[in-house]
Image: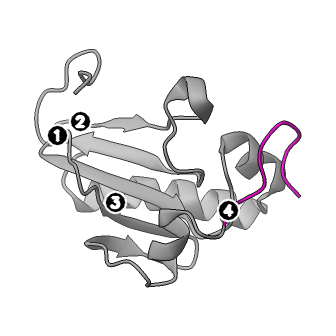
Amino acid sequence: MPVSGLPPYDDNNIFARILRGEIPSKRVYEDEWALAFHDIAPQAPVHVLVIPKGKYCSFADFSASASDAEIGGFIRAVGKVARDLGLEDPGYRLLANMGQHGGQEVPHLHVHLFGGRGLGRMISDR
């Protein structure tokens, strides 16, 4: 059941379709809890999206509804992807947009992982 104030999960959103294999993606990591793949419109030399495999619209939904194993598995996956891509030492940015005011475009929880160059204080609007 969705968290109050959030729309119900849309099984036809693009990330749900990627998870089902209906839309191809350039995958960099997958386990039972998460999938990570390159963004199709990268805003940095490394721009990977990490999504939980469960049907969650936002962090509010995820933190209220996901099991401890799902939450732990997702967070560990984000860290592993950053390490596997060699981003720990030079540094990287995580970004999660939530809702209309936050600029969320796909109603499935996802984290953007940016790296590969100095990112400054914020990623520019394009």
Judged by its main secondary structure, the magenta piece is loop
Residue 117 in percent (x, y) is at 10, 34
Q: Which mark is residue 91?
A: 2
Q: Amino acid at mark 1?
A: Ala
Earlier sequence position, callout 3 versus callout 2: 3
Residue 85 in percent (x, y) is at 21, 58
Q: Which mark is residue 10?
A: 4
Q: Amino acid at mark 4?
A: Asp
Q: Amino acid at mark 2?
A: Gly
Residue at horizontal 20 percent and vertical 39 percent from the top: 43
Determine crowd level at label 2: few under 14, some 14-19, many 20+ residues with C-alpha closer than 10 A: some
Which is in the foreground here, disc 1 or disc 2?
1
Determine crowd level at label 1: few under 14, some 14-19, many 20+ residues with C-alpha closer than 10 A: some
Dot 2 falls on a residue whose secondary structure is loop
Residue at horizontal 54 percent and vertical 54 percent from the top: 75
Q: The magenta stretch spans which residues?
A: 1-10
Q: Are marks 1 and 2 in contact (CB under 8 Å)?
A: no
Q: Reply yes or no: does residue 35 show up in magenta.
A: no
Real-space CA distance between mark 1 and mark 2, rounded to the nearest whole angstrom: 13 Å
Dot 3 falls on a residue whose secondary structure is helix
Determine crowd level at label 4: few under 14, some 14-19, many 20+ residues with C-alpha closer than 10 A: some
